[in-house]
Image (cartoon, grey):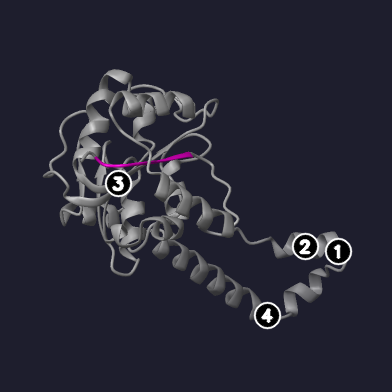
């Protein structure tokens, strides 16, 4: 970005110290501070550009979802608490939901953790790192209203965030059992709180419908209708770890047992 330099003639005139004769006979002198400053500004802009490009995610907790917040961001925040709650079950994890690339990228940085992801929406505007994960087969782009491309119990733990808020009960009845089918040890569901607006009007073409924020009682009834039980042991461990970490949830978190 070019910087417009101030007019030295105007500066001298305004200060009242401008002399025409002096200006004609004096040799121009340039301060070394200005070139050095320009070099420093250019270096800062270049570094910022490099780190916002293909090498890294621009802030691992920055979401592409419109609205006030993202539960996929919340997943990244609570990874340490999930490890406390699930222990060895965190060694093979599937994340399902928007911004899954950033979640998978974060999980892969954890020791002894393998991670995969399913992105329910297009990634045309995704960064190069995300597209690289897709190219390697670590992240798949798939419509979760249809069967997932995995065998039963392929993953020890399945985490889903944001995606269920955009599904009607008709599709939830198909998707939730499918998510549980591919989990061997548990399913963790992150959903928004009622009253929180998520999708902007311009993004409805992408998500298909505005997010439907449902209360905890609605979700509990829905889980029971699908023969899913809450994992009391995991809930207790998660809450203990979260309390020690002074964690205040921005999303609802449900811990479910897999189908036996």
- The first of marks 3 and 2 along the sequence is 2
Query: Which numbered circle lies on residue 15?
Result: 1
Q: Are marks 4 and 1 in contact (CB under 8 Å)?
A: no
The residue identified by callout 4 is 29
Picture layout, residue 230 above or below residue 174? below
The residue nearer to you, when weighing 153 against 194, is 153
Q: Residues within 10 Å of mark 4 (few under 14, many from 20)?
A: few
Q: Residue 30: in sight, yes or no?
A: no
- The first of marks 3 and 1 along the sequence is 1
The residue identified by callout 3 is 186
Could you say whether the residue bearing mark 3 is in a helix, strand or loop?
strand
Q: Residues within 10 Å of mark 1 (few under 14, many from 20)?
A: few
Picture layout, residue 165 above or below residue 130? above
Could you say whether the residue bearing mark 4 is in a helix, strand or loop?
loop
Residue under the image location 57 percent in, 54 percent down: 243
Q: CA distance from mark 2 to mark 1?
A: 6 Å
Question: Does the magenta stretch mainly form a helix, a strand or a loop?
Answer: strand
Q: CA distance from mark 2 to mark 4?
A: 15 Å
Q: CA distance from mark 3 to mark 2?
A: 70 Å
Could you say whether the residue bearing mark 1 is in a helix, strand or loop?
helix
Q: Are marks 2 and 1 in contact (CB under 8 Å)?
A: yes
Q: Are marks 2 and 4 in contact (CB under 8 Å)?
A: no
Q: Residues within 10 Å of mark 2 (few under 14, many from 20)?
A: few
The residue identified by callout 2 is 11
Q: CA distance from mark 3 to mark 4?
A: 72 Å
- The first of marks 3 and 4 along the sequence is 4
Q: CA distance from mark 4 to mark 1?
A: 18 Å
Picture layout, residue 38 above or below residue 255? below
Q: Nearer the viewer, mark 3 or mark 4?
A: 3
């Amino acid at each position: 970005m070019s910087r417009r330099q101030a007019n030295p003639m105007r500066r001298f005139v305004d200060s009242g110290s401008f002399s025409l004769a002096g200006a004609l006979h004096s040799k121009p002198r340039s301060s070394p501070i200005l070139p050095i400053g320009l070099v420093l500004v250019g270096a800062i802009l270049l570094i910022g550009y490099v780190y916002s490009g293909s090498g890294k995610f621009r802030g691992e907790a920055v979401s592409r979802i419109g609205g006030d917040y993202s539960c996929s961001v919340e997943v990244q925040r609570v990874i340490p608490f999930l490890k406390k709650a699930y222990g060895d079950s965190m060694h093979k994890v599937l994340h399902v939901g928007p911004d899954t690339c950033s979640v998978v990228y974060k999980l892969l940085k954890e020791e002894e953790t393998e991670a995969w992801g399913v992105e329910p929406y297009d990634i045309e505007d995704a960064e190069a790192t995300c597209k690289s994960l897709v190219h390697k087969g670590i992240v798949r782009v798939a419509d979760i209203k249809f069967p997932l491309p995995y065998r039963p119990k392929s993953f020890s733990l399945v985490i889903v965030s944001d995606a269920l808020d955009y599904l009607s009960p008709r599709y939830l009845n198909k998707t939730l059992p499918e998510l549980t089918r591919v989990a061997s040890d548990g399913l963790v569901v992150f959903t928004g709180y009622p009253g929180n607006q998520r999708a902007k009007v311009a993004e409805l073409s992408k998500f298909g419908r505005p997010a439907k924020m449902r209360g905890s009682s609605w979700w509990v009834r829905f889980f029971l209708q699908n023969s899913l039980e809450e994992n009391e042991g995991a809930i207790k461990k998660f809450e203990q770890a979260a309390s020690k970490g002074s964690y205040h949830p921005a999303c609802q978190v449900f811990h479910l047992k897999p189908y036996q």
